[in-house]
Amino acid sequence: MDSWQLLLSVLAVVLLASETQSLRLFLAPNTKKCLKEEIHKNIVVTGDYELSDAPGQTASVHVTDTRGHTLYKREQFVENTGKLAFTADEYDIFEICISSHLPPGQRGPNREVFLNIKHGVEAKNYEDIAKAEKLKPLEVELRRLEDLSESIVQDFAYMRQREEEMRNTNESTNSRVLY
């Protein structure tokens, strides 16, 4: 494999990794399901969620980081849709929890939950940017591509840093095993 094929392969993986992530799950009454996502520093995360109708049930959504800081919280709501947004202050793993609530002694159906999460370049609303800056469609697309290429450069820099750290650990381990 020559260097161009390798570069194109890595670029394809990075582009696929930056796509929107959607998930559908079923939530039984009075239960909670959580998802974890690894996010880099200064990355904007947006999302929307939709729950199926379930008379008498309420829901809650919580987003926390590994230190327990709350980034988004909406409790005991009866609406079936909502949006969330936050910016990662540092590289961390974030947990998104959705719970369903039903009064004691009552029975209800499982709720179907659709969760759509976007982060990085995908989370930006380029229509709003175009209106605010009075950009033409081609200029908007160029801005989006510029942001995407910057995101790819940052991802490569992060991968290079991680590779260097792993290489140093490997060399240290090899020298200790040798002696």
Image: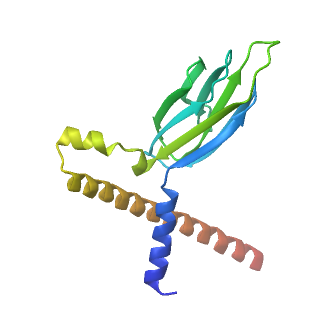
Query: Picture quarter containing residue 29?
Result: top right
Residue 32 rendering spot, x and y as whole percentages: 72, 30
The residue drawn where x is 56% and y is 68% is 163
Residue at point 45% right, 75% down? Answer: 8
- Can you give x and y, in whole percent of width and height, for residue 173 in the image? 71, 71
Report the residue at 45% width, 69% height from top: 11
Q: How many marks?
A: 0
Q: Position of residue 155 (x, y in %)?
A: 46, 61
Task: Decide if residue 29 is on the left or right side of residue 145.
Answer: right
Relative side of 71 to 55, left or right:
left
The quadrant the C terminus occupies is bottom right
Asked where in the image residue 59 lies, by quadrant, the reply is: top right
One can see residue 179 in this view: no
Position of residue 40 relative to residue 26, above or below, is below
> In this picture, is 163 found above or below 70?
below
When the figure is inspected, residue 96 is found, relative to residue 99, above or below; the finding is: below
Front residue of 52/139: it is 52
Instruction: Decide if residue 55 is in sight here.
Output: yes
Where residue 66 sits in the image (x, y, percent)?
62, 38
Which residue shows up at 32% across the image and 59% down it? 145
Return the residue nearer the eye: 126 or 41.
126
14 to the left or right of 167:
left
